[in-house]
Image (cartoon, rainbow, N blue to C red):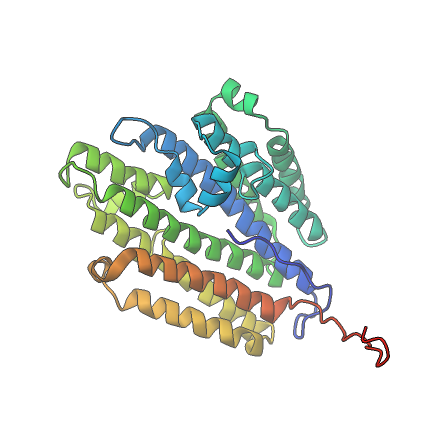
Amino acid sequence: MTQMSPVSPGMLPGLNTLLSRYAESMMWLARYMERIENLARLIEVTETFVRGPDGRTVWDTIVQINTDEVHFHTLYPHATEDDYLAFYITDLANPGSIKAMANAARENARSVRPLISTEMWMHLNVFTKALLDLEPSHIRRTGLSALCNRIKQDCQTHTGITEGTLYRDQAWLFYLLGRHLERGDQITRLIDTRYHTLLPADEEVGSEIDTTQWASVLRSAAAYHAFRRLQPVTTTPTNVVGFLLKNEGFPRSLALNLRQADGLLTALSTHYNLRRQCSPVRERLAELRATLEDQTTEDMIIRGLHEYMKWIQKEIAALQNDLAAAYWPAPQIPPQDVSPHTGQ
């Protein structure tokens, strides 16, 4: 998965108060905190609900969602349940582990310490220190579900503190951009992997096992209760996929997060004189939103849901790259003075 790119210390055109490195760090602080919460929820739901034909927990679906197959099997060629948990919770050799992402979140918060509130900084300090102190023995002692719940609650506390104390300037807008891009990326990964894992099941669609498994997809996105408000009886693959992709009222749906990202780019363009920087990003985002609005869920499935989810993931990664090129470009390296005598 995409990691933080090098930052440029220069001042951005039109950003009178926000250094480009601050904009990048605010965005990645939000993305890492979203990833930590999402991964904790995914681990908890997988342990509780996701079972294979033999009744055992299917841990490798988390590896597939995060496209970590090569890295994981290189480190753990004879994978056990403990190996999966170590890889995604405590293993610093995996940059996508909760412990490694806590360290990345802390470093990004440190970079923007002049911008964030004291309350944000204090909570992040305590939270990330607790995660950095985690060892495999702690998981066994406290229980996996209890640990995941605590991590989720701390991430949600961070969100609440940020909402209540972070000053509404460019830093706030870049923080929200990070949150919405991360949620859009994560929801497509979840749908792509879980849809194709559950689709070939031998049980009839609508059976008790099938319904439970699809409910686990909703729980993995914190969408179960919201979905039930709209669909109190019927749980089908099409309904679940449609809700997670196209519903405009659910906080983690793809449609809502793309719309929110578009609104944030509009705010940057309108209020901070960044129209030129925003234009390429907004064009790509507009195309992405149009493809989502113009298709029904049935169309997506018939035409190839896997291919469409992969395309969206690539477009979200391209949006991140466009933002980097526009707002925190890599520093230009001056050409070397080549001697005509030595060729060096």
What x and y, as percent, mark residue 46? 37, 33
Q: Which x, y percent locates residue 68?
A: 47, 44
Mark yes or no: residue 252 visible. Answer: no
Q: Is residue 93 above or below residue 30?
A: above
Q: Nearer the viewer, residue 76 or 257?
A: 76
Using residue 323 as the reference point, say whether residue 17 is left or right of it: right
The C terminus appears in which quarter of the rendering? bottom right
Picture coordinates of residue 281 (x, y %)?
A: 50, 71
Q: Is residue 290 above or below residue 88?
A: below
> 243 or 65: which is nearer to us?
65
Left/right of residue 76 with respect to residue 64 in the rendered view: right
Query: Percent x, y for residue 109?
Result: 66, 48
Q: Is residue 129 left or right of residue 82?
A: right
Q: Is residue 216 visible?
A: yes
Residue 189 vertical placement versus 262 (above, below):
above
Q: Is residue 343 above or below residue 249?
A: below
The number of callouts visible is: 0
The residue lying furthest to the left in this view is 204
Describe residue 208's horizontal placement relative to residue 90 as left or right.
Answer: left
Q: Residue furthest top?
A: 141
Picture quadrant where residue 127 is located: top right
- Which residue appears at 67% of the width and 39% of the height? 122
Q: Quadrant of residue 310?
A: bottom left
Identify the residue shown where x is 45% and y is 67%.
262
Residue placed at 33% from the left, 50% from the top? 192
